[in-house]
Image (cartoon, rainbow, N blue to C red):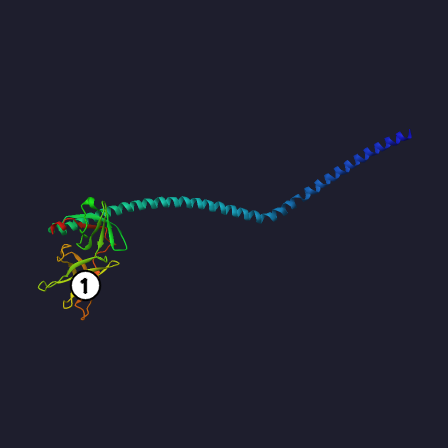
Amino acid sequence: MGSVKAVKDFSINRKKNGLLKFLIGAVALLFFLFILNIFVSPVRNYFYAVSVPIQKTFWSAGASSSSFLGSFLQAGSLAKENENLKNENQKLLAEVSSLQSLEQGNQAQNDAFAACQNSGFKLVMAGVIGLDDNDVLSIDKGSADGISDGMPVINQQNVLFGKVLKVYRDFSQIMLVSNKNSVVNVKVQQSDTALPEIDGVVKGKGGLSAYLDLIPINDTINPDDILVTSAIEKSFPKDLLVAKVIQKEKNDQKPFQSAQLDLFFDVKTANNLFVITNYKQTN
């Protein structure tokens, strides 16, 4: 009986101890919650104070990024708009240039035809499409347009450019007066028609330059004298403009004198040239 009673007393005490521990735990939890509630505001304030600079940095970065992105997108839109305007402007400029080129071509053709009308020459107008390192010019007309080798080529002011070197169906190559293989018979234009003609030849040096040669040593030539084609060899019509004398070179020990020249043709401004298609048939 004593042992049974002892077991019951132990069970009761165990329950009391469990209840006591529960009450102590509950009180402790309530106390902790009370303390936490008191200090929650300062804790939050502390973490806020610490985190504000970081938040501001990220905010600024975010705002800047947003602003930059907006600006970027706006810039992209403006760039696209500017590109469209640029393309439209270039299109208009191309149309204007085309009209001007057509007008200039028509004017050049009229001038050249008027200049050659009394000579009975037939002309084919051609556009310049290229120049190589050997002073050979390419034009956009060929055998299909009645062009053949050896035909003279001039501009609207009757300036000699050279002669047709090689012909293809739709384009041709022109050997310029400055080509190293070019030799043009010329005469010095005399202001006094009573003076005898001075004959010589213009030889190409390459690099768009040439020189006057085979002028008799006793003949007088001067700077600014004008050289025109002569009819000695009949390769070109006479009186086409060729060059102007810059400086003569005379040596009494030699039978001939020479001179440096300023050629009249200008490939940089030559948009349209004219091939004389019937000159060879008239000789």
Residue 279 visible to the viewer? no
Q: Position of residue 233 (x, y in %)?
A: 14, 57
Q: Position of residue 6 (x, y in %)?
A: 88, 32
Q: Position of residue 212 (x, y in %)?
A: 19, 62
Q: Disc 1 marks which residue?
A: 213
What residue is shown at x 19% (from left), y 65% (from top)? 258
Along the line of sight, the residue nearer the viewer: 280 or 1: 280
Q: Is residue 109 above or below residue 210?
A: above
- Residue farthest to the top? 1
What residue is shown at x 20% (from left), y 65% (from top)? 259
Q: Position of residue 197 (x, y in %)?
A: 11, 62
Q: Secondary structure at mark 1?
A: strand
Question: On the rendered structure, is 261 left or right of 6?
Answer: left
Along the line of sight, the residue nearer the viewer: 80 or 43: 80
Q: Quadrant of the N terminus?
A: top right
How many dots with numbers?
1
Question: On the rendered structure, is 36 left or right of 120?
Answer: right
- Residue farthest to the bottom? 252
Answer with the quarter of the image where residue 178 lies.
bottom left
- Residue farthest to the right? 2
Along the line of sight, the residue nearer the viewer: 188 or 256: 256
Along the line of sight, the residue nearer the viewer: 150 or 14: 150
What residue is shown at x 42% (from left), y 45% (from top)? 76
Residue 112 visible to the viewer? yes
Amino acid type at image mark 1: Asp
**Counting other residues with Cα less than 10 Å from the Cα at mark 1, is it few (<14), some (14-19), or many (20 or more)?**
many
